[in-house]
Amino acid sequence: MATNNGPPIDLQPQKNAIHPTPPYSQGPAVPGQGQVPMMPVPQRPAGCPPGLEYLTQIDQLLIQQKVELAEVILGWETNNKYMVKNSMGQQVFFVAEENDCCNRQFCGPLRSFVLHVQDNLGQEVMTLTRPLKCGSCCCPCCLQELEIQSPPGTPIGYVIQNWHPFLPKYTIQNEKKEGVLKIIGPFCSCRCCADVNFDVFSMDESTKVGRISKQWTGLVREAFTDADNFGISFPMDLDVKIKAALFGACFLIDFMFFEHNK
């Protein structure tokens, strides 16, 4: 299980534009005012989309969903917000959902969404888009998918659900929609006092290369909120665009299996 300081896990905006800070931003962190320390900005290698240079230096991410009081007290579904950290506890990204009230309340975890991923300067560096589709496993023509854009408007990867009678399975695709990795989850995603692991494999499913882990957050939080923590591990030398696609897969998995009001 990934922790802030623990060992690695074992195993639709205008195109090509980085937009100014939108109204849903938390704003850049200010040192000395109780904010989480920020990850230093590494040098951006050639071919790396702006803002994804952070991913070139890490092999783990910790995603922490913020607890919303309106959801806890009233059961009223609000736009999700997430803080993304590296293994040293430094903030890497901030993620905010953009959605309307009717979509959230009536479609629940099946809802379409746009997630805006911002760096520590408040610039949007990724956009994650999920269309509205049927969530029944009996409808192989209506399987879930997610598009990852970086910069916003430029697709760099996709997460495609694969039909299977009893296992959650996904294919990570590159910008050309070519399969690169597979994700296979457990038969049952409901576990008490334990993490739920979705393993990342090579395309032939013979080699495990990473993991997306929904972490157990304690009895009270699990019982009364749908705010979850996830750990992601992947090879350090994995293509940065595929790292971003795995990052996006974590949110699709969250909505499909863990975004249910308690």
Image (cartoon, grey):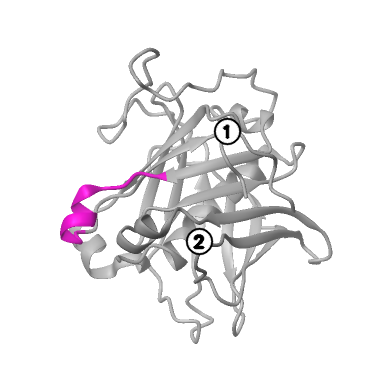
The image position of residue 110, as x and y in percent, is 36, 68
For label 1, the crowd category at 10 Å Cα-Cα, with few meaning under 14, some 14 to 19 and many 20 or more, is: many
The residue sitting at 56% across, 47% down in the picture is 247
Q: Is residue 49 above or below residue 13?
A: above
For label 2, the crowd category at 10 Å Cα-Cα, with few meaning under 14, some 14 to 19 and many 20 or more, is: some
Total marks in image: 2
Dot 1 lies on which element?
loop
Q: Is residue 161 above or below residue 187?
A: above
At label 1, the amino acid type is Asn
Which mark is first along the chain, 2 or 1?
1
Judge by depth and name the residue closer to the eye, 246 or 177: 246
The residue singled out by tag 1 in the image is 86
The image position of residue 211, as x and y in percent, is 66, 54
Where, quadrant-wise, is the C terminus in this rendering?
bottom left
Judge by depth and name the residue closer to the eye, 106 or 92: 92
The residue singled out by tag 2 in the image is 253
Dot 2 lies on which element?
helix
